[in-house]
């Protein structure tokens, strides 16, 4: 699955574990050793400064660890409680707000874009439905693949963007295909959903996430930031230099660059609560949850399917996130309630979406009978 949220563009093996609650069983030592190895091998292979990884399997075991460094300059070790930019995991929040508005009768998934957005003029807007925008079948060009845009963000990651500016980068390109006829992962879709939310509610997508999701669930370490700075308690983010020979700081990024497509910040514990909530459809109606889990079969993937702001990887429900300096993956297994979260602090690396690779490796060790890869 292509995410393309890369907007710019000697590994430590220190390991820090958080003690589990006394009621939480531990995994057998051999499984722990294998899961540790999945992470440390990936770190070594891709020169990643640090990783946080966690597995919760009810009644079987809990494994939560920080590996390597959160700050290369100071040598600060990665701590499992640290905050990360979560990139496209944000889409699951945005899609949930949309479905809540559907439940409230304020829009329909079959409404077309032209009902809510008339400036700028979107190609095929009268034929693109909200549902198609949410499940990535709109065909609209992904603005984060526009070279001019990428250079502008790289030159000034602190710049504040109007959503219309982002959409203009998209509509400068022809659509990939006619609406509803194919799949292409495009961040443009979730900027548009952010605009739809603002049009209907009068509030920003971040404000609606806060009042509808973050506050009710008590996600005290989750936020839609208002500036480019990372909050206190955050892990430092890094990226490869232009020539690929060194690692440079990549923390700063104004949230307006991504809006509801990728702006949120969170930690593994809040993400555990969130992925359980969204996978169970706890904040939306049964009908909306059915829509949420109705996926598009990706033509380039045998294991991944994209749904309504969430994805299915084999039997897992969740999402991955790729953004400047950070890469993350959250996943929930409905059959037994298992949750796996992986977060790493180098993006881009020499391989796209390393967090998902680590997740798959850890899942194969922790849940060998529940995966097909």
Image (cartoon, rainbow, N blue to C red):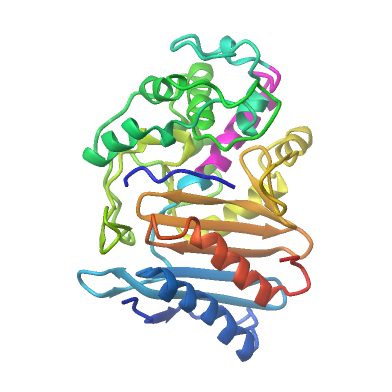
What's drawn in magenta, residue-wise? 90-110
Q: Residue at x 35, y 33 (%)?
A: 256
- Give the number of callouts: 0
| x then y, percent, for residue 113 | 58, 16
Q: Is residue 56 left or right of residue 358?
A: right
| x then y, percent, for residue 341 | 55, 63
| x then y, percent, for residue 27 | 64, 83
Q: Residue at x 57, y 77 (%)?
A: 63
Q: Nearer the viewer, residue 373 or 344?
A: 373
Q: Nearer the viewer, residue 178 or 251?
A: 178
Quarter of the image containing the C terminus? bottom right
Q: Can residue 290 be seen in the rendering of this structure?
A: yes
Q: Residue at x 43, y 45 (%)?
A: 264
Q: Quadrant of residue 369?
A: bottom right
Judge whether 26 appears above or below 172 on screen: below
Judge whether 192 appears above or below 302 on screen: above
Whether 95 is among the magenta residues is: yes
Q: Is residue 181 left or right of residue 352?
A: right
Judge whether 124 appears above or below 219 on screen: above
Residue, far front? 243
Judge whether 173 appears above or below 2 on screen: above
């Amino acid at each position: 699955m292509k995410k393309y949220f890369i907007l710019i563009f000697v590994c430590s093996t220190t390991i820090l574990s958080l003690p589990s609650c006394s009621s939480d069983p531990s995994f057998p030592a051999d499984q722990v050793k294998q899961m540790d190895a999945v992470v440390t091998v990936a770190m070594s292979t891709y020169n990643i400064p640090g990783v946080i990884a966690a597995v919760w399997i009810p009644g079987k075991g809990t494994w939560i660890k920080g590996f390597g460094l959160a700050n290369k300059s100071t040598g600060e070790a990665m701590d499992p409680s640290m905050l990360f930019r979560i990139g496209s995991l944000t889409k699951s929040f945005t899609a949930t707000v949309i479905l809540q508005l559907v439940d409230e009768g304020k829009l329909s998934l079959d409404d077309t874009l032209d009902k809510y957005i008339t400036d700028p003029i979107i190609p095929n807007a009268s034929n693109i439905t909200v549902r198609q925008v949410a499940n990535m079948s709109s065909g609209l060009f992904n603005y984060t693949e526009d070279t001019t845009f990428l250079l502008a963000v790289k030159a000034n990651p602190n710049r504040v963007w109007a959503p219309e500016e982002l959409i203009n980068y998209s509509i400068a390109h022809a659509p990939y295909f006619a609406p509803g006829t194919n799949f292409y992962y495009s961040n443009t879709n979730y900027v548009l959903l952010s605009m739809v939310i603002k049009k209907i509610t009068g509030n920003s997508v971040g404000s609606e996430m806060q009042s509808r999701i973050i506050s009710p669930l008590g996600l005290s370490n989750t936020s839609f930031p208002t500036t480019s700075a990372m909050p206190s308690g955050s892990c430092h983010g890094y990226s490869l230099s232009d020539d690929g020979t060194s690692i440079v700081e990549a923390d700063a990024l104004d949230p307006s660059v991504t809006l509801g497509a990728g702006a949120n910040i969170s930690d593994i514990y809040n993400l555990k609560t969130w992925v359980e909530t969204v996978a169970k459809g706890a904040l939306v109606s049964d009908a909306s949850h059915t829509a949420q889990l109705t996926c598009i079969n990706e033509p380039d993937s045998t294991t991944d399917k994209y749904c309504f702001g969430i994805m299915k990887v084999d039997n897992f429900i969740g999402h991955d996130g790729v953004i400047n300096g950070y890469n993350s993956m959250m996943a929930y297994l409905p059959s037994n309630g298992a949750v796996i979260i992986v977060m790493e602090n180098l993006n881009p690396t020499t391989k796209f979406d390393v967090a998902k690779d680590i997740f798959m490796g850890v899942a194969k060790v922790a849940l060998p009978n529940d995966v097909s890869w």
